[in-house]
Every structure is written in C-alpha cells, then in structure tokens.
Amino acid sequence: MAVNAAERNAMDRALHLAARGPRGANPQVGAVILSPEGAVIAEGWHHGAGTPHAEVDALSKLAPGAARGATAIVTLEPCNHTGRTGPCAVALIEAGVARVVYALDDPGVVSGGGAERLRAAGVEVEAGEQADAAHALIAGWLTAQRLGRPQVTVKWAQSLDGRAAAADGSSQWITGPAARADVHRRRAEADAIAVGTGTVRADDPALTARDGDALLPHQPIPVVIGSRPTPADAAVHRHPHTPLFFATHDLHAVVADLHTRGVQSLFVEGGPTLASAFIEAGLADRVLAYIAPVLLGGDRLALTDIGVGSIDEARHLSVDEWVPLGDDLLAIARPVHATDPAEDPQNEGAA
C-alpha cells in the first residue's frame, strides 16, 4: 500500500518534532499517530537518553485502546530491543496499531529488526518515506553508530606555503573574515571542539562559535588534550559548557570516552601537533584546510609528523569541494582508503 497524503504530511510533522530532541547518544526521533480516518491523534519525540522513545511518548498521550487500528508515522524504524526502555515495536503491537510508516532503517545490530517483528505480528509496514530528510537530521548519529566513535573533522588554516604561523609564532590572522566566519559556522555544527594544551597556553582560545561578538545558539563542548596543565584563568574556563580535559596522548581513548558521552561529531581545531596526531592515528574522517594567499616561510608548519617516511606512505585525500571564501580557499577532503582502488590517486598516474 502506497503512502498517502495524510501519512506524508504526518512524516513532515514527525521530522519537525524529532528536531526538538537533543543530539547525543540516542538519535533524534519523532512520531505521529493517525486515526484510521487519517486524523492526528497523538504526537511525540525522544527527549533524551533514558526517556521514552518517540513512539511510546506519543502512545502515552492516548487513552487505552485509542490506538487500535491506527497508523504510526516514525522517522526511524521502531526499535526491537530492551535497554533503558522497552522495544517500541512491541509497544506498537500491544497498542493495536495496524500500520507503521517509517523513514530510515535502524542500523543497530541489537536494536534493529523492529519492522520484521511488526510484520510477524500482522502489522502493515512501509519503509523509506522521506528517508533523505531523516538521514540528514541524524547523520551524525548514524556515522557515530557506524564508526563506534564520533566523526572527526580536522581543521587548520595555512599560508600558501603551508605555514600555520610566522616565525615568531603569531598567527592571527592568516585567513580573512569570510574564512573565519565559515569556521565559526562549522564549529556550531559540531558537538565538541578539541585543541591541544600547547594551543591553549599559546593562544588562549575561547573555543566558542560566534557570529561577530554574539554567541551562536549551539556551542560545541570544549575538549583540551595533553599533559600540560591549563592555566586557571584560561578563556576556555569561561565557555558556556564545562570543558573536558584529557591528560593523555591516546587519542583512541579520548574519542572512545567522548562516544560514551554522546558526542557524535568532533571538530579538531589545533594546533599543528594535535591535528597531525589525529591524522597519524587514522582518526581524521574529514579535513578542512583553509588556504590564504600569503607567504610566511620559516618552520611553523601547518602539519608536523604524520607518520609518512616516504612518498609511498603518503596519506591520499579525495577533495569533495573547493570553496572560495573571499581571497581564501577552503579544501574539504576525506581520506582515500587503500581498499578502494576507484579512489586511489596512484591509479591516475604520477604527476
């Protein structure tokens, strides 16, 4: 049975409701319950870890038996496992729901399979309605589920000759205002922002996301990595979120810890030592290189050692986009995996 207009409109509403939920260890999910005649009789969304899932939140607003013969519209496949809450698929079955329309399959090995359970109980199931919109909403969560850690973006700004600072260490500002505004916008899209203790001590960054002098509505959690102490009067202590400090060089342990805290995306801001360490560890899922038309010379390189000893060990990237930003240029790239010969630059011949 095809999705009808009432169900399509209800999915629009469910996606809107889902966006109200917080980003974290659980996905943002919305649900709308339609009567057999197609009228909205209940709505719900997931309010955060440990709270009822969207379907149960919506069902809780109905009197017993009111959902019998109804249709549930959900942005993610109803779950099929018991965690801090019970299986949503079972809740829908027990409520007497006759039809379920959802957008995305649940990728979880344990939590997936709700659609099969519903069908086995005689519930009609339709999957894929507005899947692209649902995917865009929880893309960070989906990536974190696949990786088992946050998605990591490594960013740096550099001169045309690959320097992050002048010989005296000064670096403000290599890039122009358009590039800096773009950085702040991308900071606001991340759950957390990381710097090394060397950058904290040298530059005293606030690690906030701003529009001019005003803070943007969403602020990433500041993360400071390294063994050196952070000064008590450092600007990071005045961040809207309490900073997280990791006195370690084990980046795998850091991202694993952040994953348990519900961090889905990590924006690595610098400096060169930390950016290089993430790349060397194979933890950079995306690179943002802001390139300014200026020459600095000297030894203040934008990247240091990344574990490359010869040209055969070069870390190849695939550039997804070149973005002009005033006089500057942003390269948005991702690592090319050796297992994917179609993307291996070495297959294109030497330059």
Image (cartoon, rainbow, N blue to C red):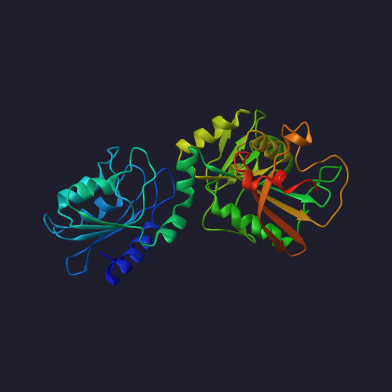
Q: Is residue 223 at all visible to an observer of this figure?
A: yes
Q: Which residue appears farthest toward the bottom when viewing the image?
A: 5
The residue shown at (68%, 40%) is 275
Image coords of residue 288 (percent x, y): 67, 50
Left or right relative to 329: residue 295: right
Asked whether 54 or 148 is in front, the reply is: 148
Image coords of residue 224 (percent x, y): 61, 37
Instruction: Say which quarter of the image contains residue 284.
Output: top right
Left or right relative to 39: residue 298: right
Image coords of residue 239 (percent x, y): 57, 47
Image coords of residue 335 (percent x, y): 64, 44
The residue shown at (47%, 52%) is 139
Asked whether 243 or 159 is in front, the reply is: 159
Asked whether 308 or 64 is in front, the reply is: 308
**Count of labels shown?**
0
Q: Is residue 161 above or below residue 253?
A: below
Q: Is residue 209 at all visible to an observer of this figure?
A: no
Q: Which residue appears farthest toward the right when viewing the image?
A: 297
Left or right relative to 175: residue 52: left
Asked whether 85 or 281 is in front, the reply is: 281
Instruction: Say which quarter of the image contains residue 212.
Output: bottom right
Image quadrant in which the N terminus is located: bottom left
